[in-house]
Structure formats: structure tokens, C-alpha cells
Amino acid sequence: SIISGAVAERMKLWSFLIFAVVMTGFIYPLQGAEVGVEAAVKTGFVDFAGSGIVHMCGAALALSGVLLLGPRYGKYG
């Protein structure tokens, strides 16, 4: 929902659905496995249920989506 709120009214539905499948099928699992294990081993930090990884990855993807898509033309005067 972080990303869908950021790119609302800027993407077509099918484009967003494809993006969501790639994100949840590939990006989140790879990012969670890599960063979660690495952080636990190096620092002792335990990210219960991966909430920190999910929110950080979602925020980074939302920011990149907003920068790529640009402003909502015609929405605000």
C-alpha cells in the first residue's frame, strides 16, 4: 500500500499489477533474505517478521516510482 498510494493516478492498473507481482515475487524475498540474515549476523539486530525490510524496500520503490512517473498533471492547480 505504500507504493500504490505513491503512484496513485499515475500508472495504469495492469502496469501496477505486473509491478506488484515482480516486487512481491522477487524483490521482497531477495531483499529480505539478504539484508535480514546479514543484519542479524553482523549487528545482532533481529527484524521480527521482516517489517523493517518490507517498509524500507517499499519506501525506496515508492520514491523511485514517483521520480520516474513525475507529478500528477491536472490534479492540482
Image (cartoon, grey):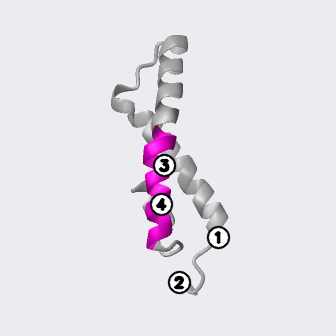
Residues shaded magenta: 13-28
Look at the image and tell me in which quarter the N terminus lies.
Answer: bottom left
Residue that badge 1 annotates = 70
Q: Position of residue 3 (x, y in %)?
A: 47, 57
At 39% across and 32% down in the image, what residue appears? 50
Compared with residue 16, is residue 50 higher up or lower down, i.e. above or below? above
Q: What is the number of the mark on residue 75? A: 2
Question: Which of marks 2 and 3 precedes in the sequence?
Answer: 3
Between the residue at mark 2 and the residue at mark 1, the CA separation in whole angstroms equals 12 Å
Question: Which of marks 3 and 1 precedes in the sequence?
Answer: 3
Q: Nearer the viewer, mark 3 or mark 2?
A: 3
Question: Which of marks 3 and 4 precedes in the sequence?
Answer: 4
Q: Position of residue 68 (x, y in %)?
A: 66, 63
Residue 15 belongs to the span the image colors magenta: yes
**Left or right placement of residue 33 versus residue 68 in this view:** left
Between the residue at mark 1 and the residue at mark 3, the CA separation in whole angstroms equals 20 Å
Which residue type carries mark 3? Met
Compared with residue 39, is residue 16 higher up or lower down, i.e. above or below? below
**Under tag 1, what secondary structure?**
loop
Task: Tell me if mark 2 has few (under 14), some (14-19) or many (20+) residues whose alpha carbon lies within 10 angstroms of its own.
Answer: few
At 47% across and 16% down in the image, what residue appears? 40
Which residue type carries mark 2? Lys
Which residue type carries mark 1? Gly
Residue that badge 4 annotates = 18
Residue that badge 3 annotates = 23
Residue 34 visible to an observer of this rendering: yes
Between the residue at mark 4 and the residue at mark 1, the CA separation in whole angstroms equals 20 Å
Q: Nearer the viewer, mark 1 or mark 3?
A: 3
At 47% across and 60% down in the image, what residue appears? 18
